[in-house]
């Protein structure tokens, strides 16, 4: 009988967590760190934040007012500051849970559902983790809000974990 060599090399595990300004996404990150991170794998956590697309302005707005470059720069700065704030909160949560995780930031710009799906298709993670805002069927079906998590669950090619905040159940 031939002995099989034991392979103690740790498997790489890449997890994307979509984060935004909401408590739901931060809870999903915490849940991921408690439930999906393993000591037997090399854990690579990618925090993905999607900024709203930059506004496209002509020199005049709808009402005929001139929009200055300062206003446009201020809006861009606000978007960058918001992304940094969200990522900072997410990294603080990661720091409280584990030191065995490599954390990477990714920031996209555009429609969240499309950006998340495109990035996940490109980097091919083992799992996508997202929070649920819990808007429910009625609001989504009546066109009041869209569900980014539902769209991603239907279109990405990896397992998707949608985490509901316990206060929303």
Image (spheres, rainbow, N blue to C red):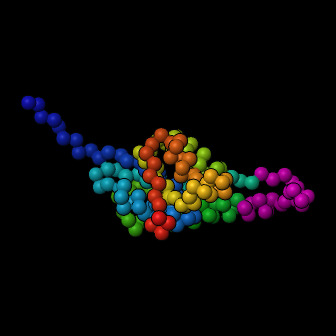
Main SS category, magenta section? loop
Residue positioned 37% across, 52% down in the render: 43
**Front-most of residues 84 and 142:** 142
Q: Which segment did they paint magenta?
A: 56-75
89 vs 56, left or right, is left
Q: Quadrant of residue 62?
A: bottom right
Residue 152 lies, in percent from the top left, at 53, 47
**Front-most of residues 60 and 149:** 149
109 vs 56, left or right, is left
Residue positioned 81% across, 53% down in the render: 57
Task: Examine the structure image and report whether residue 139 is included in the region drawn in magenta.
Answer: no
Residue positioned 68% across, 64% down in the render: 78
Residue 65 lies, in percent from the top left, at 89, 61
Residue 6 in view: yes
Residue positioned 54% across, 61% down in the render: 134
**Front-most of residues 128 and 58:** 128
40 vs 21, left or right, is left
Residue 61 lies, in percent from the top left, at 86, 57
Task: Examine the structure image and report whether residue 64 is included in the region drawn in magenta.
Answer: yes
Report the number of numbered marks: 0
Q: Quadrant of residue 125?
A: top left
Looking at the image, the residue that sits furthest to the left is 1
Residue 76 lies, in percent from the top left, at 70, 59
Residue 47 in view: no
Q: Quadrant of the N terminus?
A: top left
């Amino acid at each position: 009988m031939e002995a099989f060599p034991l392979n103690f090399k740790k498997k790489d595990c890449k997890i994307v967590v979509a984060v935004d300004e909401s408590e739901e996404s931060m809870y999903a990150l915490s849940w991921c760190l408690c439930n999906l991170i393993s000591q037997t794998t090399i854990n690579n956590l990618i925090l993905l934040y999607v900024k709203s697309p930059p506004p496209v302005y002509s020199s005049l707005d709808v009402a005929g007012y001139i929009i200055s470059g300062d206003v446009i720069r201020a809006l861009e700065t606000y978007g960058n500051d918001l992304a940094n704030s969200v990522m900072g909160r997410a990294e603080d949560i990661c720091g409280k849970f584990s030191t065995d995780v490599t954390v990477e930031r990714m920031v996209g710009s555009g429609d969240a559902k499309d950006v998340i799906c495109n990035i996940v298709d490109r980097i091919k993670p083992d799992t996508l983790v997202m929070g649920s805002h819990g808007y429910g069927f009625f609001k989504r079906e009546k066109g009041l809000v869209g569900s980014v998590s539902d769209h991603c669950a239907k279109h990405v090619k990896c397992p998707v974990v949608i985490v509901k905040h316990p206060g929303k159940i």
